[in-house]
Image (cartoon, rainbow, N blue to C red):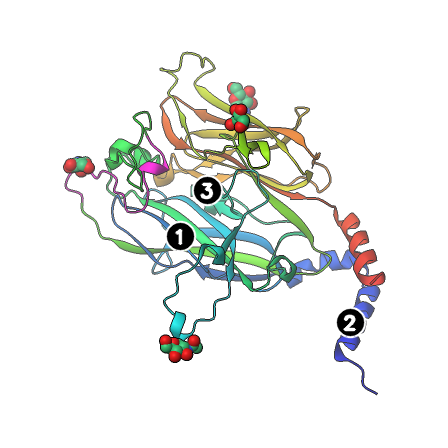
Amino acid sequence: MFVPRDFLLSLAILVLLLSTPCSSSFEKTEEKIKSAMFLSPKFELGPGSVINKFYYDIDFPKGHVAIKSFDAEVVDEAGNSIPLHETYLHHWVVARYHLRHVTYTENDSHRMLQNSDYVLVRNNGICQADILPQYFGLGSETRGTPTDIPDPFGIEIGNPADIPEGFEEKWLFNIHAIDTRGVEDKLGCTECKCELYNVTVDEYGRPLSLDYKGGMKCCHDNTQCKLKVGFEGPKRSLYLKYKIKWIDWDDFIVPVKAYIIDVTDSLKLSNDSKGTNSDHDCKIEYQVESCSRDHEEENGCVHVKRTSLPLQTGGYVIYAVAHQHSGGTGSTLYGQDGRVICSSTPSYGNGNEAGYIVGMSTCYPKPGSVKINDGEILTLESNYTNTKDHTGVMGLFYLLVAEELPYQHFRHSTSSSFFMD
Ligand SMILES: *[C@@H]1O[C@H](CO)[C@@H](O)[C@H](O)[C@H]1NC(C)=O
Ligand SMILES: *[C@@H]1O[C@H](CO)[C@@H](O)[C@H](O)[C@H]1NC(C)=O
Ligand SMILES: *[C@@H]1O[C@H](CO)[C@@H](O)[C@H](O)[C@H]1NC(C)=O
Ligand SMILES: *[C@@H]1O[C@H](CO)[C@@H](O)[C@H](O)[C@H]1NC(C)=O
């Protein structure tokens, strides 16, 4: 008699599942964790120079898996860690995209990549369009900020059901780094002060407004920050070294959604074909005026910026962390009733790294203990000291949210995929 192999296999899996109590499946996750170290493409930096590069199709775990952590740091060709006062890591972000399979034949080898061949697959929100679309990403704090996602949660990637026919899932890096060896003003260079870069137009040649004093428009790819007179130093080749942990997908893993809330965001009304809409308006960066000039701020030179926005779909917070730049003193996300969802504070380095944020504290609420309701209005607060002014600062909050808890998820997947099918 002919018995299809698949049938035997699924029978074997079913038997295995039935004989394994679900609690031990959760406990065993650790043994199944895979981990790999990768290097980004090489980038070259000389004293005062800047790279802001996009690298497509980076090395990434393949197949249907759950990402458990993503750690990164800048290293040189010998693998040595590079300190922040030499190369300031402004940010690295990792985004997902779908790319159409193209079978090149001799005749179309010069074919240009069509726009429709590339589709950015953004995180779950909440900024407009393709602003802050990343699933992973940090800045100078990268070495000192935990990224582990506790069991049984994970960021689901590579699910064939989510990849359109004819497309492949791929990942890209955006890496922005500033070499501050020998510069006149290290903090100024890392804050992208326009006068230090002698920049008056953006990277597309459009003039910057006169009140734009600093930010990413002044430290785009290939710009140069002002060096001390006569300083010379070698160019060097660097990499972003990154370590990913993941686990093969199974029905015991509970997926989390990734959200980024930006303190510069506001909802603005706009018109589209469907009528009047309210759209997010994330500007990513903002300026902090120094308190001597800011007469309204009389609270010991703390600059407080806040925004309030609804999160359409809520869930249970599994992990949360803020992102701030030098001068940041902490950031808190509040629920609509004023409860603290997460408070994340920076730690500053010592010695050569004094003044740089080298880590951000994270929140790992006991799963189920911190819930955001659907449509709940969240308030994000980002504080900076403003004894002096700061340009190009950020106030982001990164949230991983599970829509179900493990026992709910298990009940759901048990009934739908193992017994009812
Ligand atoms: C490629 O182009 C040549 C001439 O233009 C044509 O003869 C040939 O059939 C084409 N091959 C394919 C695979 O389209
Ligand atoms: C600044 O830029 C202007 C024109 O873009 C150039 O003429 C001038 O020499 C630059 N100054 C420095 C110090 O590089
Ligand atoms: C939307 O369009 C209507 C009519 O076309 C106009 O009166 C209104 O001001 C527009 N609103 C915005 C926010 O642009
Ligand atoms: C921000 O500053 C305000 C005013 O000083 C203070 O009430 C609040 O607790 C601060 N928040 C954080 C996260 O430091």
* Residue 306 appears in the figure: no
Q: Tell me if label 2 and label 3 are in contact, CB under 8 Å.
A: no
- Residue 256's x, y, as percent? 65, 48
Location of residue 82 in the rendering, given as x and y in whole percent from the top left corner: 36, 50
Task: Report whether 122 appears left or right of 317.
Answer: left
Name which residue type carries label 2.
Ser
Residue, disc 3: 141
Which percent across, then down, holds residue 253?
A: 70, 55
Q: Is residue 151 above or below residue 383?
A: below
- The CA distance from mark 1 to mark 2 is 43 Å
| Relative height, residue 89 to residue 68 (above, below) | above
User: Label 2: which residue?
Assistant: 10
Q: How far separated are the C-alphas under marks 2 and 3?
A: 46 Å
Q: Which residue is mark 1?
A: 54
Q: Main secondary structure of the magenta part?
A: loop
Q: Quadrant of the C terminus?
A: bottom right
Q: Circle 1 — which element? A: strand
Does the image show residue 116?
Answer: yes
Category of crowding for the residue at label 3, using alpha-carbon neighbours closer than 10 angstroms: few (below 14), some (14–19), many (at least 20) = many
* Amino acid of disc 3: Glu
* Region of the chain picked out in magenta, as a range: 214-231
| Ligand number 2: quarter of image | top left
